[in-house]
Amino acid sequence: MGKKPRSPQHRNLGARSRPRADEVQADLALAARRAEDDAELVDALATEALTPAQRSPEAVLTTYDKLTAQIDEYRRCALAATAREEAARTREEAAEADRQRIRTDLDLAAQAQAEAEEIRGRLARAEARLDERDAQLRDREKAAEAGFVAEAKRARAALDAELAELRRGVSAEVAAERERWVTERTEALAEIERTRREQLADAERVHAELAREHQRLATRAQQLEHDQGALRGQEIQLERRERDLEREVTARAAAEVTALDREVQILRIQYAAAQEAVADLHRQLAEREQALLKIGSSDPAHVLDELERLRVRNAELRDKLAARIGDEDLDRLRWLEQQNRELNSAREQLSYELQELRGAALADRINNLQVKQLADAERHFEVLTRGYEGRIAELRSAIDILYQDRPDPGTPLFPRCVAMDDDPALDEPGEVSGDLPDLAVLARSLQTTMFAEHDRAYRLNDICVLLGGLAMSRLHLLEGMSGIGKTSLPRALAGALGTDCAVIEVQAGWRDRTDLFGHHNTFERRFEETEFLQALYRAQTPRHRNRPFFIVLDEMNLSRPEQYFSVLLSKLENDDGVPIQLVTRGDGRAPRQLVDGTSIALPPNVWFIGTANQDESTLEFADKTYNRAHLMELPAQRPWLNLDRRPVPALPPYGTDALRRAFKQARRTHREEEKAVLAFVADLAGDLHEHGRAVLGPRVEKQLRTFTPVVVAARQGDPTGEQPEYGDADQDGRSLAADHFLATKVLRTVRGRYDVTVTGLGKLREAIRTAWDLHKMAGEPVRCVRLLDDEVHRRES
């Protein structure tokens, strides 16, 4: 095999780091042509892991073209997305133009209002002129009284006629002008309102379309980013593939050079062997010449005959020698020849296996190189992913900062509270009576009104206890079985008093104050106003701020009020005047009733009424809540009242101040009854602590002093016939206050105490009966006895 010249590509291969596609193709073609002549290189290529189709430059170029076309497609998509963004921006500008037109219409409305004010001014000036004419008439009358009576009468008649005519003309002109102005104003306002609604609808539709377009653009942008990342990965793989091809071409060129070097070495060995053969021939020629010199001048023909004779002799000697070889030697010679052939065959087999192993090693090296490339690509993708995630986090932080630092001044942070400011019905001060109500008359009027207007029958004793609770605490707890009217009682009470009542349904998942008041939605830049917050704000509007306002927390013990109601529990116990902060900073239009646009105060006209069912789905109130609240348990059966359902005169709308003054007046009037109930409870203090482990604290005593006079004042007089009576019809105001307060505020603490025995409960019951008789209380302590009997029955069963 002759030596082939090396191409310029092979000479410059080491000087280039990244060959072009045509150069790679030329190198591959040259290597392929040379591989056809080298059997070892063909065998090595046959054992490689890559297929010829994968190693062909056409496949590489096709992949590269596909990637280039995909890049162009992504660029076209990006241009289309940019065009859609421009269209969305154009729509936003159109919406801004619509808003500008709306503002112009509002300015026109303001101008129309200014014109109306000018018309009012003209009317005022006309009335001033009329007053001036009246003054002139009075002057003329005075002159007529001085001596011109007849002339004055005529002048007065003429002036009266002229004045009447002038008044009719002015009145007609004013009426026509006012009617025209009202008509124009109504039509203008209707047109402006219709235009505003249409433009707002168009603006909302445009905003919705813009939002959807932005969403589509964002989704498309994410897809483009993902595709660009994949494209970048494919480009990296293509670059690495090109480097692999370059290394492969370099390796094949090196193999080609090695084969050529081997050929050169073989030629050199052959040349040396030829030189040695020439030297040997020269030596033989010299020897022949020396032999001829030794023979001397003998005849050459004789010499040739002698040589022929010697050859024949040598042949005979060889024949004789061959004839002397034995059968064993001949077999051994044949066996050695067979072994020689087998060894040659084994050597060829081993040589073939060696070539296969070399090819497998080359394929393994190529596979290891590909695995390393894939690992590098994976690490690169991880780096890109972390970079994109960091960038996304930065963009989100920037968006949050922009939303926080650039609020829309036209969007109120509390939209529903602002809407209440704009409500004319809530902006008008409510009329309240400043008269001091008679609590006895008030209690019976409430019973009659609730029965006639709201179809709710309640016992007079329960209404008297409720009024006493209003004076004692601003937190009420209504307990009892479901369906007995716990939620209906505050509604009927609010309707009878001519005020309002808001019912808030407590959820089982409430845990903190945000469940009660709401929270700030940073993304939408507004406060999520709960129904409770709206009710608390409505109680402070001019319509209700001077009237009692009731907020009912329906099923208050579905969750723990000590958690979600803790702020108000502290405020009701000791109000320091500091408002409850809702947000740290107010944005947009601030509601008028909020303090600094960020906090809400606890208004003094609000009472909180919580209803509670005692079943497996509810929680037990903590002592902290019981101690601060007024507790009532409605009877399981509604009473029958001996009343008709004819309409009754409505109660005057008593204000909060009037009710509080009535409560203070009752305390001044019924101080003796208050002392009697305090003495009754004080006599039981020892027995309560010994047998029931109950302690009378300063808070309980303060509540008793406030509660008792109001119940006594409201219970005066004979009640209407009620069925059933529940055993307390014979109680007067003093005994009713003592029985209810002792049962709900003191004896309630003995429930479930492990250190209170059944015997102790019995002794406590006897002590209460004895003290009841000793202090000459009316009726029987039915509530205290019923509570102790129920507790004894529960422990025994």
Image: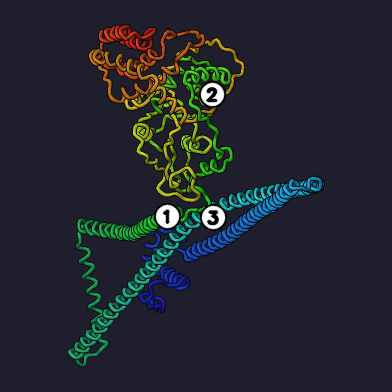
Q: Which of 513 and 227 is in front in this view?
A: 513
| Residue projecting furthest to the left | 294
Q: Cβ–Cβ below 8 Å for labels 3 and 2?
A: no
Q: In the image, what residue occupies the spot 41% across and 32% down?
A: 509
- Tell me the mark number nearer the camera, choosing from 3 and 2: 2
Q: Residue at x 44, y 39 (%)?
A: 518
The location of residue 749, given as percent across then percent down, is: 30, 18
Label 3 and label 2: CA atoms lie apart by 59 Å
Whole-angstrom CA distance, mark 3 to mark 1, is: 22 Å
Residue sitting nearer the eye, 65 or 175: 175
Residue pointed to by mark 2: 496
Task: Answer with left or right where residue 368 lies relative to residue 162.
Answer: left
Residue at mark 1 to residue at mark 2: CA–CA distance: 52 Å
Q: Which amino acid, mark 2?
A: Ala
Query: Where is residue 195 shown, x and y percent of the image?
Result: 68, 50
Point out the residue furthest to the front here. 147
Q: Is mark 1 on a helix, strand or loop?
A: helix
Mark linked to residue 401: 1
As drawn, the label of residue 519 is: none
The answer to whether residue 751 shows anywhere in this view is no
Residue at x 47%, y 36% (from the top left corner)? 536
Q: Which residue was labeled with disc 3? A: 217
The amino acid marked with disc number 1 is: Ile
Labels 1, 2: front one = 2
Q: Which three-letter amino acid code belongs to the residue tagged 3?
A: Leu
Q: Report crowding for label 1: few under 14, some 14 to 19, many 20 or more residues within 10 A (C-alpha).
A: few
In contact (CB < 8 Å): disc 3 and disc 1: no
Query: At 46% from the left edge and 8% from the top edge, which residue is drawn?
Result: 725
